[in-house]
């Protein structure tokens, strides 16, 4: 038998109709995650055509993007964000009701960022095909699922048929060998990978992250890695499931139970690239050389080690423009640059381990004068767990804001924005011009680097704060 | 798309990695329809802090009026999956985007809405970037782009997507015609997650 990759195995299991030169493959979707921002037009199409949602049982809805992160006690509170956002949220509630879809809305303890709650509920599982109208759907690939973002037209296709028309992408193996040094996190690793292969380095490909450094990561760290696959242009990112994956999933509300669990695990264990499987491309990264990373420009590939100087590419007009927007000097490190806002949150870094790391640096310290720090849990579940561990007390004692779950400051559409011209250190995934608000300047970093910047009031090497290894 | 050819002058945005947050900022995404999104197209590049048009931004120049073809730098449309990006470009009046590389999700979304994503070689691209306002002609059936100097290049496009663009075929209709296959797939799966 030909040696095949993890991606090939999951793809092959979901081919309803194979592709030909003239037609793409029809691919079956096991889990369709939906949220309020990218679905209204898809539901309108179904209503126009008089079509039902074919598999509401495989569809899971929540609200995260345009929802405020201040407490919402009633629908009246939604007016905070504006009439459009309010209409969008109300329409989501109505659409889910009309089409019989489970909505984890404001009255649900399970509400949260769609890419945080899928895994948390055990709905995300190895070998599934998972789609959502959000590019960070790649997050779920951490479980060995084939998960990718789709547009609103395709959301309509999945709602109506549970299938998508797809051409088979290429494969890219990223082998990360060696041990990640103390004080360096999964966020630093993925930023380093994007810096190496570029923001278009994965276009047309599905990435499989492999090697000893990946196997050593816990599930939350693996999710951070796969989350940012799209920032390298990749269609999806995957990690082969192993005992760490199974341990994470066991006993979760939507994980298989009883005898089904054993059947599932037996199947999941087959989901790995065979020895000798050939990838279209391979890249190798030495984990032992990694350091905390910070972005200096206006895309996630413009990134340097925390103590390294910003490169000088004076002949590149785009590069120069990005540096001017960021008010950053070529040839100098970002160290000591004063910050205005620190944001810990987003589908990249808002899980319990991210908050624990943040708390380990804030504990006994204060957020520097003049700095606003916002900590936004990825889900209501994460919020509860953090509060049970007393993390909220540490955050509040340090002078940080502790919010309800949501996408928050990752993208300026829910009331949480960075004012024009201000410099933000953010644990999110995109430092595009204006992403966090008109004129906002964003430095992407790990929760450790973000928390250290909040306390110091400027960019510092987070390793000076570490009392124990990360 | 009813016409099988597009003939238009180009507007050029030479920057590479033009992301979907630049094409349409997130604050315009609270809409529940797909109409009127042209207003938000490149909003923070077209208008300054006081909401005054930025005179030297290419889309704001008088000669750009009515242009249907946009030439962008490498890796156009990277970033989010928002279909609002092609909706905004179409609503503004564009029918095609040309670059050396176009991000996967944006390209997919464009094809589903009749916005033609065209990938060209670096030499052709460099010429287009250096000659804003050049009148180009696109033959959708032949998948060719012709420059004013007569040079014609073929661009890659998925055969099915091209068929749908020309015939105006509804891809959802095609998927629905596969319903028997979908049902039998659901029945034959040995193990369902």
Image (spheres, coloured by chain):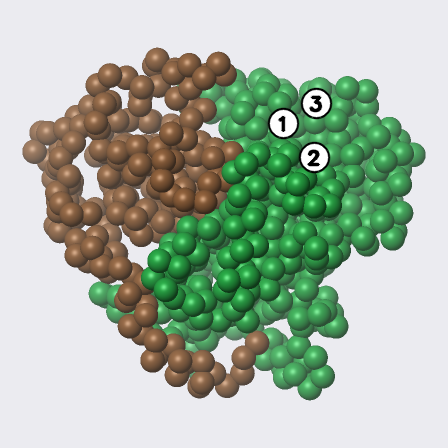
Give neighbour class at mark 2: few <14, some 14-19, many 20+ (Cα, 10 Å).
Answer: many
Image check: A216 left or right of B21?
Answer: right
What secondary structure is found at the residue carrying circle 2? strand
According to the picture, the residue beneath numbered tag 1 turns out to be: A418
* Residues indicated by labels 1 and 3 sit on the same polypeptide chain: yes
According to the picture, the residue beneath numbered tag 3 turns out to be: A340
The chain drawn green is chain what? Answer: A
Tell me, for residue A343, which label it has, or none: 2
Above/below status of A142 relative to A417: below
Q: Earlier in the sequence, mark 1 or mark 2?
A: 2
* Chain B shade in the render: brown
Q: Residue at x 70, y 23 (%)?
A: A339
Nearest the viewer among A144 and B109 is B109
Task: Tell me which chain the residue with mark 2 is part of.
Answer: A
Say if residue A104 shows up in the picture: yes
Q: Residue at x 34, y 79 (%)?
A: B181
Marks 1 and 3: which is nearer the front? 1
Q: Earlier in the sequence, mark 1 or mark 3?
A: 3
Which quadrant is the N terminus of chain A positioned in?
bottom left
Task: Tell me which chain the residue with mark 1 is part of.
Answer: A
What secondary structure is found at the residue carrying circle 3? loop
Residue at the farthest right position: A364
């Amino acid at each position: 038998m030909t040696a095949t990759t993890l991606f090939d195995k999951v793809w092959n299991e979901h081919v309803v109709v194979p592709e030909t030169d003239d037609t793409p493959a029809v691919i079956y979707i096991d889990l369709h995650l939906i949220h309020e921002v990218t679905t209204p037009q898809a539901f309108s199409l179904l209503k126009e055509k008089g079509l039902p949602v074919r598999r509401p049982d495989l569809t899971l809805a929540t609200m995260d993007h345009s929802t405020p992160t201040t407490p919402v006690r009633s629908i009246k509170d939604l007016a905070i964000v504006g009439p459009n956002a309010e209409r969008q949220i109300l329409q989501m509630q109505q659409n889910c009701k009309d089409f019989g879809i489970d909505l984890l809305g404001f009255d649900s303890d399970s509400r949260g960022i769609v890419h945080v709650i899928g895994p948390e509920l055990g709905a995300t599982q190895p070998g599934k095909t998972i789609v959502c109208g959000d590019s960070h759907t790649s997050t779920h690939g951490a479980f060995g699922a084939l998960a990718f973002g789709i547009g609103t037209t395709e959301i309509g296709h999945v709602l109506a048929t549970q299938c998508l028309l797809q051409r088979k992408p290429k494969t890219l193996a990223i082998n990360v060998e060696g041990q990640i040094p103390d004080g360096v996190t999964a966020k630093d690793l993925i930023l380093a990978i994007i810096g190496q292969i570029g923001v278009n380095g994965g276009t047309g490909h599905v990435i499989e992250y492999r090697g000893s450094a990946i196997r050593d990561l816990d599930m939350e760290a693996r999710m951070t890695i796969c989350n940012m696959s799209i920032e390298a242009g990749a269609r999806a990112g995957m990690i082969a499931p192993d005992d760490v994956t199974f341990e994470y999933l066991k006993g979760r509300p939507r994980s298989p139970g009883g005898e089904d669990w054993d059947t599932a695990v037996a199947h999941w264990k087959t989901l790995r690239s065979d020895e000798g499987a050939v990838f279209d491309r391979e890249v190798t990264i030495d984990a032992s050389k990694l350091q905390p990373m910070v972005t200096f420009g206006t895309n996630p590939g413009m990134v340097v080690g925390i103590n390294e100087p910003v490169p000088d590419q004076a002949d590149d007009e785009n590069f120069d423009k990005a540096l001017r927007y960021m008010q950053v000097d070529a040839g100098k490190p970002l160290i000591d640059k004063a910050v205005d806002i620190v944001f810990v949150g987003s589908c990249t870094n808002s899980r319990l381990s991210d908050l624990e790391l943040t708390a380990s640096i804030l504990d006994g310290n204060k957020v520097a004068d003049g700095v606003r720090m916002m900590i936004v849990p990825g889900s209501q579940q994460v919020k509860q767990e953090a509060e049970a561990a007393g993390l909220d007390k540490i955050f509040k004692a340090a002078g940080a804001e502790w919010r309800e779950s949501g996408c928050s400051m990752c993208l300026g559409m829910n009331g949480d924005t960075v004012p024009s011209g201000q410099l933000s250190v953010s644990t999110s995934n995109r430092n595009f011009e204006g992403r966090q608000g008109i004129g906002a300047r964003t430095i992407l970093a790990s929760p450790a680097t973000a928390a250290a910047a909040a306390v110091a009031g400027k960019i510092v090497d987070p390793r000076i704060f570490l009392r124990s290894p990360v | 798309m009813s016409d099988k050819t597009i003939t238009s002058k180009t507007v050029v945005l030479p920057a590479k990695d033009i992301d979907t947050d630049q094409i349409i900022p997130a604050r315009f995404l609270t809409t529940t329809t797909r109409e009127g999104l042209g207003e938000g197209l490149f909003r923070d590049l077209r208008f300054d802090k006081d909401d005054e048009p930025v005179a030297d931004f290419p889309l704001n120049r008088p000669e750009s009026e009515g242009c249907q073809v946009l030439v962008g730098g490498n890796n156009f449309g990277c970033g989010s999956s928002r279909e609002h990006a092609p909706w905004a470009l179409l609503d503004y009046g564009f029918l095609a985007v040309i670059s050396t590389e176009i991000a996967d999700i944006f390209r997919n979304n464009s094809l589903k809405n009749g916005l033609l994503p065209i990938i060209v070689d670096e030499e052709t691209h460099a010429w287009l970037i250096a000659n804003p306002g050049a009148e180009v002609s696109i033959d959708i059936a032949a998948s060719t782009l012709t420059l004013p100097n007569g040079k014609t290049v073929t661009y890659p496009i998925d055969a099915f997507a091209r068929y749908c663009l020309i015939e105006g075929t509804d891809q959802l209709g095609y998927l629905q015609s596969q319903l028997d296959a979908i049902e039998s797939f659901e029945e034959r799966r040995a193990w369902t997650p």
